[in-house]
Image: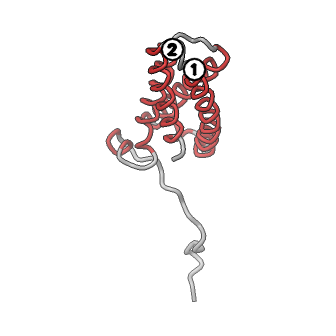
């Protein structure tokens, strides 16, 4: 007969965030923080480097990428310094953030691709920067689906 002290087979305690910088960056999904920050940084840097001919389109891309970059940086700092231990709902907050940001990045990716297509005939150097921003935006969107 089974002991009453053992938990049922369906219970699962999710692992805690690893401690230390090396342990944090070598575990999945936390290893995706650095590429997410790098590609997010590249998106708003490349869009800001072009002539913003379509402020409504590229303004949304800048808003999404800059806001996502800053909030991802705050999450990374909270994991590195252990601030997440003060709150019990940090996993829910992290999941909601990444789900929402994934949807927003996908909308920004479509808008940046459209801005790239319509800027093709104007200035070739701005077009190439827009292409790089579109690729970085798609890559950043892929990084969020961890």
Q: Name the residue located 57 percent from the left edge and 29 percent from the top edge.
A: 113
Q: Name the residue located 53 percent from the left edge and 25 percent from the top edge.
A: 70
Q: Residue 26, relative to residue 131: is it above or below?
A: below
Q: Distance from label 2 to label 1 (Cα)? A: 8 Å
Dot 2: few (<14), some (14–19), or many (≥20) neighbours within 10 Å?
A: some
Q: Nearer the viewer, residue 102 or 94?
A: 102
- Does residue 27 appear to the left or right of 108 in the view shown? left
- Extreme residue toward the right, this view: 56
The residue carrying mark 1 is: 62
Q: Position of residue 133 (x, y in %)?
A: 49, 25
The quadrant of the image that shows the N terminus is bottom right
Q: Nearer the viewer, residue 138 or 65?
A: 138
**Number of marks present in the image shown:** 2
- Extreme residue toward the front, this view: 121
Q: Nearer the viewer, residue 83 or 36?
A: 36
Dot 1: few (<14), some (14–19), or many (≥20) neighbours within 10 Å?
A: many
Q: Secondary structure at mark 1?
A: helix
Q: Name the residue located 32 percent from the left edge and 42 percent from the top edge.
A: 22
Q: Quadrant of residue 121?
A: top right
> Circles 2 and 1: CB distance less than 8 Å?
yes
Q: Which mark is residue 102?
A: none
The residue carrying mark 2 is: 48
Q: Residue 56, relative to residue 78: is it above or below?
A: above
Dot 2 or dot 1, earlier in sequence: 2
């Amino acid at each position: 007969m089974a002991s009453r002290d053992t938990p049922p087979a369906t219970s699962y305690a999710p692992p805690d965030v690893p401690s230390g910088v090396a342990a944090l960056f070598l575990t999945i999904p936390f290893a995706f923080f650095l590429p997410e920050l790098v590609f997010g940084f590249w998106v708003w840097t490349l869009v800001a480097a072009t002539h913003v001919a379509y402020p409504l389109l590229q303004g949304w891309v800048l808003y999404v990428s800059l806001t996502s970059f800053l909030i991802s940086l705050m999450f990374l700092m909270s994991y590195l310094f252990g601030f997440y231990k003060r709150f019990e709902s940090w996993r829910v907050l992290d999941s909601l953030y990444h789900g929402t940001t994934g949807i927003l990045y996908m909308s920004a990716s479509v808008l940046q691709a459209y801005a790239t297509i319509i800027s093709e005939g104007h200035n070739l150097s701005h077009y190439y920067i827009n292409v790089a921003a579109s690729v970085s935006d798609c890559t950043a969107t892929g990084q969020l689906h961890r």
